[in-house]
Amino acid sequence: MSHQGGKPAEAADEAYVTLRDPPPLAASRGRDLIVGIELLPVQRLAAFSDDQLEIVVSHWLHETLRARYAHVVEYAGSGDKGRDRAGFEGEIGTDPWDNYQCKQYGHKLMPSDLWLELGKIVYYVTADAYSCPRRYSFVAPRGFGPKALDLLASPEAIRDGLARNWDDYCSSLCGYKEIADALSGFVFPAFDPIGGQRIVDDLDGTAVYARLFGGGLTKPRPPDAPPPTEIAPIEMPYIRQLVAAYDDHAGGAVVSVDTALGHAVYGRHLRGSRREFYCAESLREFSKDVLIEQDAFGSLQDQMLDGVKFTAAQAHASGYDRALATCAHATSVELGDHPLAPELKPADRSGMCHQLVNDDRLRWVP
C-alpha cells in the first residue's frame, strides 16, 4: 500500500483498530441469545411481507382513523384496481372516499415505482370503475426518495411524467393514445406519502402496538383502587362463600358478614380478600386497555382455575382451610406465556380465586 508524502498509514491503522475492537453490545438478557439484536419497530415494519403490511395498515386505519370513516373496505388480489384499502365516509362506493395503497419494497420509493399505480387512477376513473378518490395515500415502510416526493407534490409533473412513461409502465392497462385525452384534463387527488415511522408513531400507545412490534405492554399498569367502604352487590357471591367458610371453621359461630368483620382473624381475612378481589378487578380493566384479544383476562382466569382446582378439590378440615390453601397455591401457579403474566402481583392471584368463587366456578364450602 502506498503512502502520499511518506506519511505513515494512520487511517489504515485506525481501521485495523476498529476491526479488532467492534462496537460494544448491550448487556444480554436470556431472550437476546435466542432472538438476537432487537429491531426498532420501524425496522420490523420494513421487514414485513406484503400481506403483513396490509394487516398493519388495517389496524392503523382502525386505531387512528375510525372516526373518519363509516366503512373501510379491504380489496385483495390482482383485481384490486390499485386499491388495497379504501375508506368511505358514507356508504361503500359513495363519495367522498380515500385510497390507501401499500408498497413494501426493499428501497425508498422512486418515480419508477409509482407510474403504474398513478396510471391506474386515470384509467379506472376514466372507465367509471370507481370515482376519483379525495385523497390517495401511498404507504411505504422504507419511505420515499426525493424525486418521488417531488412528483407526488405536483399534479402537472404527474401528468407530464405519465405522458412520457405510459407505454413503458402502463401499457398493460391500455395504449397511450387511448388515454391521452383523458389524461390531459384529469384532476388528480391529493397525494399523501406515508412512511413507516408515521405508522409506528400513530400506533404507539394502542392495544395492537405490542402485538405488531413487540416491546411489551404499551402502558404501565395504574395503581390499584382500594375497595369501597361498603360491600358492593357485585361482591356478594364470594363474600357469602367466605362467611360460610368462616362459619364452617368456627363450628357455626359466624352467621353474617357483620359477625365475620367483628372477628379478629376472620375480619382481617375478609378485608384482605376484598382488597385482593379489587386488585384482580383492576387488572381486568387494565387488560381491556392494552390487549386486543377478546376476553384476554378470562383466559388468564381459566389458567388460574386449571392451576388451583385440584387443591380446592382435596379434603380440608374446613372451608376456611380450603380457601387458605387454594389462595396460597395460586401465588405459585405457572401461567405460561400469557401477556398479563408479567403484571401479576400476589394479590391479583388470590383475587382471581375470589373472582372464580364469585362466578361460581370455585366454592369454599360445597
Image (cartoon, rainbow, N blue to C red):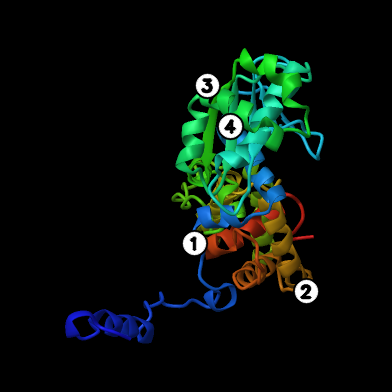
Image coords of residue 120 (percent x, y): 71, 28
> Which residue type carries mark 2?
Gln
| Circle 3 residue | 156
Q: Give residue 62's quadrant in the image.
A: top right
Judging from the image, what secondary structure is the residue with disc 1 in?
helix
Q: Are marks 3 and 1 in contact (CB under 8 Å)?
A: no
364 left or right of 275? right
Q: How far apart are the two marked residues, 1 and 2, measured between alpha carbons?
A: 27 Å
Q: Is residue 215 left or right of residue 335?
A: left
Read off the residue under disc 4.
137
Q: Which residue is mark 1?
A: 264
- Residue 335's spot in the image, x, y percent? 66, 67
Q: Mark 3 or mark 2, which has the lower sequence index? A: 3
Disc 1 marks a residue whose amino acid type is Ala
The residue identified by callout 2 is 314
User: Under tag 4, what secondary structure?
Assistant: strand
Separation of disc 3 and disc 1 at Cα?
85 Å
Q: Is residue 127 above or below residue 291?
A: above
Residue 180: image quadrant is top right
What residue is rendered at 31% in x and 85% in y? 17
Q: Quadrant of the C terminus?
A: bottom right
Q: Nearer the viewer, residue 42 or 114?
A: 114
